[in-house]
Amino acid sequence: MVNVLFVCLGNICRSPMAEAVLRHKVAQQQLSGQITVDSAGTGDWHIGKLPHEGTRRILDLHGISYLDMMARLVSGDDFDKFQYIVCMDQSNGVNVRKLPGGDKRELMYFMDLLPEEELREVPDPYFTGNFEQVYDLINAGCDVLLDRIRSEKLQQA
């Protein structure tokens, strides 16, 4: 089983959008028994809340479920559970590294999946309001990540 964790600040915009999009792609490719996807935040303001209404709106528009998704904090325990920890920006990567064991863990940055893009961090639509732009980046990046998982992990199993 390959486990993927997306991390952003409050776990209500970017990381749950990425979780929902990748789950959708995994299900479409009939890989649900081989890949699990989760998300978490580095800040505790929204713990237990649903994804942001802008995230829900864009996911609804694309027919992607966010059922049972609730904001949670990233923890040191996640280092044992997830092979891929994907941070939406550098600030969240710094905060993940501060967790016990975080300094020894390899992290990914989402925009590294899209080297052709000028942006190096996924913009936070909580502040920008541009959920469409974030969805487009996440949709493209999740395709690349899924291809990477298929080549790196699933073929080894």
Image: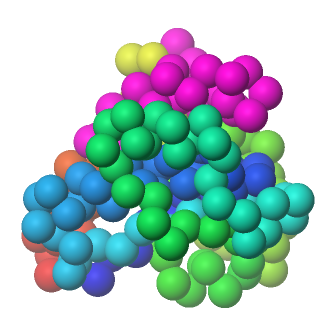
At 51% from the left and 21% from the top, the residue drawn is 133
Q: Quadrant of residue 155?
A: bottom left
User: Which residue is at a point 15% across and 57% down the rendered structure image?
Assistant: 28
Q: Position of residue 120 (x, y in %)?
A: 59, 25
* Figure quadrant of the N terminus: bottom left
Tell me the chief SS of the magenta region: helix
The range drawn in magenta is 118-144
Q: Residue 144 location in percent, x, y?
A: 29, 41
The residue lying toward the viewer, choosing from 66 and 86, is 66
**Residue 113, x across and y down, in percent:** 41, 37
Residue 145 visible within the image: no
Give how far across and how far down residue 151 sits, in percent. 17, 58
113 and 20: which is toward the camera: 20
Left or right: 111 in relation to 42: left
Q: Is residue 27 left or right of residue 116?
A: left
**Magenta stretch contains residue 132:** yes
Colour mode? rainbow
Residue 55 in the figure: left or right of residue 32: right
Task: Look at 51% across and 84% down and name the residue there.
Answer: 81
103 up-or-down from 128: above or below: below
